[in-house]
Image (cartoon, rainbow, N blue to C red):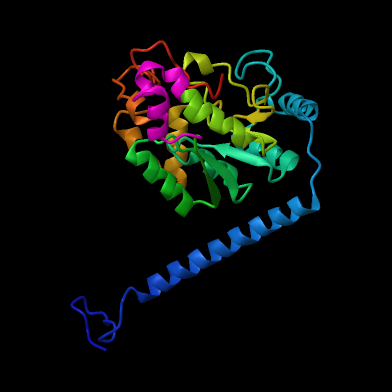
């Protein structure tokens, strides 16, 4: 042993002072992978036993009961309100009881708050990432960080056509000429195909995001996709989301702090000026405000 300059005892010559940290990190990784494997083995076992698939009518009724249970009665703070609406955790707990593992979380990778909220009660839940081929590098990086840091299962949902194949079939840069068709091909249709394997999907839609979203319910039946849809964060503000991320050290897409409060595909997203609508940077200059996933 030798004394270090601070008066403490230095590590023996030839030893790696970071070895213990690396060993601990490897142990955590192995433990995490073991838990993930056990979870997926149990899902496979349940699938092999055969779970009765519930019909759209049955799921519609479950959504009705869920809305009745979770939605508030009256406006909070207004005379006549008799019951506050459920919290995000209460909505997720209800989904876990009703649907087990037949749950999909849709995440744009603007942040990891929604996956974090859901995974706390449904570990290794499937998180669907719409890999359009047009994402910012920061968004792809956030996706990778979420996969490494959270107890979730990332499912990359891809279009039938690559960007090059779409250019060949529809002409280059379809997003600039017909953004609705581009979104349909690269987002809406791939998600629709993927959701066929689930009974409920979870979104991070918030009422404060845009005028088109002010009436977002906590629970509804998605007629277009034929399954239940829940929006646990509907009542949250953007500040609520940032506060949660800070409190739980949840990864955020760095673009959120670079003038992009709403993040979509790179060609169709611009920075938002102070005071502008948070979604003003999406399809700027076009008569389009939604990609089609939530309408």
What residue is shown at x 55% (from left), y 28% (from top)? 189
Overall secondary structure of the magenta section: helix
x then y, percent, for residue 25: 43, 67
Q: Residue at x 63, y 30 (%)?
A: 230
Could you tell me residue 272's position as x and y percent? Answer: 31, 22
Does 108 sit above or below residue 16? above
Q: Is residue 264 visible?
A: no
**Who is closer to the viewer here, 268 or 234?**
268
Left or right for 202, reference 8: right
Residue 147: image location, x then y, percent: 47, 50
Is 264 or 70 nearer to us in this picture? 264
Give the residue furthest to the top: 287
Q: Residue at x 65, y 13 (%)?
A: 79
Q: Quadrant of residue 26?
A: bottom left
Give 32 or 58, whichever is nearer the viewer. 58
Q: How many marks?
A: 0
Residue 143 appears in view? yes
**Residue at the limit of the structure toward the left, as seen here:** 5
Residue 285 magenta: no
Q: Quadrant of the N terminus?
A: bottom left
Residue found 47% across the figure and 39% down from its top: 244
Viewed as shown, does residue 201 lie left or right of 257?
right
Residue 68 locus on image (x, y percent):
75, 24
Q: Which quadrant of the rendered structure holds the C terminus?
A: top right
Q: In the orientation shown, which residue stands out farthest toward the bottom?
A: 1
168 in magenta: yes
The magenta stretch spans which residues? 160-182
Residue 156 is left or right of residue 272, and the answer is: right
Report the side of 166 relative to 15 (left or right): right
Residues 70 and 261: in front is 261
């Amino acid at each position: 042993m030798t004394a270090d300059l601070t008066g403490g005892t230095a590590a023996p010559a030839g030893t790696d002072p970071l070895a213990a940290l690396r060993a601990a990190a490897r142990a955590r990784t192995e433990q995490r992978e073991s838990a993930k494997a056990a979870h997926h083995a149990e899902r496979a076992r349940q699938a092999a036993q055969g779970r009765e698939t519930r019909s759209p009518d049955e799921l519609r009724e479950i959504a009705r009961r869920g809305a009745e249970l979770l939605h508030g009665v009256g406006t909070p703070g207004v005379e006549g309100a008799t019951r506050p609406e459920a919290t995000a955790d209460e909505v997720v707990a209800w989904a876990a009881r009703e649907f087990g593992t037949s749950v999909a979380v849709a995440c744009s990778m603007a942040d990891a708050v929604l996956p974090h909220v859901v995974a706390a009660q449904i570990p290794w839940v499937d998180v669907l990432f719409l890999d359009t081929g047009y994402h910012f590098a920061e968004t792809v990086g956030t996706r990778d960080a979420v996969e490494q840091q959270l107890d979730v299962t990332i499912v990359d949902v891809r279009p039938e056509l690559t960007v090059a194949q779409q250019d060949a079939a529809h002409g280059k840069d379809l997003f600039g000429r017909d953004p609705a068709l581009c979104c349909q091909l690269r987002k809406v249709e791939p998600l629709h195909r993927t959701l066929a394997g689930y009974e409920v999907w979870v979104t991070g839609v918030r009422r404060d995001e845009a005028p088109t979203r002010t009436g977002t319910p906590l629970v509804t039946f998605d007629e277009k996709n034929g399954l239940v849809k829940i929006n646990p964060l509907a009542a949250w503000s953007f500040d609520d989301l940032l506060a949660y991320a800070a409190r739980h050290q949840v990864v955020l897409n760095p673009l959120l702090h670079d003038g992009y409060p709403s993040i979509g595909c790179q060609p169709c997203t611009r920075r938002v000026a102070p005071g502008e609508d948070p979604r003003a940077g999406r399809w700027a200059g076009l008569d389009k405000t939604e990609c089609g996933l939530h309408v």
